[in-house]
Image (cartoon, rainbow, N blue to C red):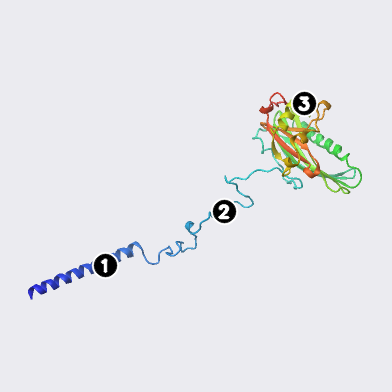
Amino acid sequence: MAGKNKKTNDNTSIVIALLLCCAAIIVLVAVLHPFGGGKNNDTGAETDGKQSSSSSGTDTKDEPDGTAAGTDGTTADTPSTAGTEPSTDDVTDDTHNPPTGMHITTEQSTFDENGSHIQMIYPTVVSHGSADEITKTLRSEMDRRRVEELLGFAGGESNYKVENVSVELCRPTFVSLVVTGYCYVSESSHPEYFAYTINYDVNAKKLLTGEDLIKDFDAVREKFTGGGFRTVYGQAGLLDEMSYEDMITAYHAEYGIYPEVYYTSDGFGIAVELVYTLGGYALFETTQSSLSGAIYAPQI
């Protein structure tokens, strides 16, 4: 009997030990995983309503309103298109050039002249000793171009509008602008778009023409027809409809007929006139260094 009682006591001790171990495990689990925690075990989402980043297989990062981000998170700058209303705010020269002291703002002016309704955007030079003189020269050139353009339209009510004045280069010694817009006569089936350039040498106090700016037109033509210029603005599929050679064939240095050209801080651009069905005009640019000796190099 003593042996049997001893065996029974041993079994009881083992059972008690097992129960104590189970109790200890339950207490440990309760400590590590308290009831009513902040996670939902079924979805992995926090119970405060915020979605866990692991709950979706797609990137939920929001893009800025009104922009379509590229693969690098940036958006491409595109030139202004015809028909876009210009801003009523002054525009400063901060697109192509860093601040230099001298800069250009723009302002709108609307008036009627000789039966035509005119909407202009005029440049104003500031922060320069000859600012008033330069401003007057630039505006007078724009007025001359307007009168010249309107002479080609006879009869009917005409509307002439400068849509944009792009300050491509603004330095204390040199200014280069690209002016774009359209002219429309009520009897016409479509407007006529235009693009012209203004280049002003501050030290010489004069406007520079194509003859002043292009020293070797054959070299410029060769680079252009060879595809050495990149398209800055143009109708989609333009080069499928018209070759580089066709676009520049109307210009002849021997007759003093040059394309409209402009400058950026390190570039040289051409504004090519086109028919309405091809967009009215297109802009092309290359580097100044690639035409060294063939073009005038402004001292900037």
191 to 3, vertically: above or below? above
Residue at 10% from the left image edge and 74% from the top image edge? 4
Q: Which residue is mark 3?
A: 212
Task: Please state, as top left, top right, bottom left or bottom right, where the N terminus lies in the image.
Answer: bottom left
Q: SS class of the residue under badge 3?
A: helix
Residue 216 x %, y %: 75, 25
Q: Which mark is residue 109?
A: none
Give the CA separation, mark 2 to mark 1: 50 Å
Answer left or right for 147 relative to 200.
Answer: right
Q: Neighbour class for label 3 at 10 Å: few (<14), some, many (≥20)?
A: few
Q: Earlier in the sequence, mark 2 or mark 1?
A: 1
Q: Which residue is mark 2?
A: 62
Task: Please state, as top left, top right, bottom left or bottom right, where the C terminus lies in the image.
Answer: top right
For badge 1, the amino acid type reads Cys
Q: Neighbour class for label 2 at 10 Å: few (<14), some, many (≥20)?
A: few
Residue 166 x %, y %: 72, 39
Give the CA separation, mark 3 to mark 2: 52 Å
Q: SS class of the residue under badge 1?
A: helix
Q: Nearer the viewer, residue 291 or 38?
A: 291
Q: Nearer the viewer, residue 196 or 119?
A: 196
For badge 2, the amino acid type reads Asp
Give the CA separation, mark 1 to mark 3: 99 Å
Q: Neighbour class for label 1 at 10 Å: few (<14), some, many (≥20)?
A: few
Tag 1 and tag 3, C-beta contact below 8 Å: no
